[in-house]
Image (cartoon, coloured by chain):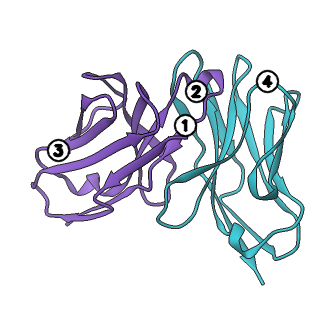
Amino acid sequence: AQSVTQLDSHVSVSEGTPVLLRCNYSSSYSPSLFWYVQHPNKGLQLLLKYTSAATLVKGINGFEAEFKKSETSFHLTKPSAHMSDAAEYFCVVTKYNTDKLIFGTGTRLQVFP
Amino acid sequence: SQTIHQWPATLVQPVGSPLSLECTVEGTSNPNLYWYRQAAGRGLQLLFYSVGIGQISSEVPQNLSASRPQDRQFILSSKKLLLSDSGFYLCACTRGQTSSGNTIYFGEGSWLTVV
């Protein structure tokens, strides 16, 4: 069965420092993976997605993620955090041969000035 | 791209009262539609999905139901709300299967508090 594990429920960084949000997946097939961001009381916005093309995926707002099959990871990174990056981030994997998404439990990113 | 409208944005309802949350989609035809619930401090749980008018699949047994009376309209309902129905409800849509890498788009969400 497919699943995702977000290894940190909370991450705190200072503005201008790098961001790393960790996600490991479990899948018996080549998955499609997504990162979504949710600002307070808002819907979810797609940051980026991996669909078996390039393993390094660039998304919006300077975020990127690297698909590493050997490590079953899809960590989200950004070189320099902005205050506006403070939000909840979800790693998502598609369920095999269905149209259903499996969400991680989320990582709350705090950015301090 | 698709635009998803959800209403109401916020709702406070007493236990035992009915519920109707509505979602409409613009910018696409024949979308796949979803209702998700996000309970406080937890991830998203898929409640219902629909691949066409009148076609509803339920993911988990619960106190809620869904209907799709029109191609781009998806309604979440309950006859009698429970306290455990409180949460943030998100409508979403895709064109084609997400397993093929198609993006799923989300509405702004509806906050439901059952008191």
Residue A14 point in image, percent of width and height:
82, 77
Q: What is the three-letter code of the residue carrying label 1? A: Ile
Q: Is residue B80 above or below residue A16?
A: above
Query: Neighbour class for label 2 at 10 Å: few (<14), some, many (≥20)?
Result: many
Residue B42 point in image, percent of width and height:
49, 53
Q: Indicate which disc residue B104 carries.
A: 1
Q: Is residue A97 above or below residue A87?
A: above
**Dot placed on the residue nearer the N-terminal end, 3 or 1:** 3
Q: CA distance from mark 3 to mark 4?
A: 40 Å
Q: Indicate which disc residue A52 carries.
A: 4
Residue B20 point in image, percent of width and height:
19, 48
Q: Quadrant of residue A8?
A: bottom right
* Residue at x-position 41% and y-position 41%: B26
In the displayed structure, does residue B30 sit left or right of residue B7?
right
Residue A34 point in image, percent of width and height:
68, 39
Query: Neighbour class for label 4 at 10 Å: few (<14), some, many (≥20)?
Result: few
**Dot placed on the residue nearer the N-terminal end, 3 or 2:** 3
- Residue B95 visible to the viewer: yes
Chain rendered cyan: A
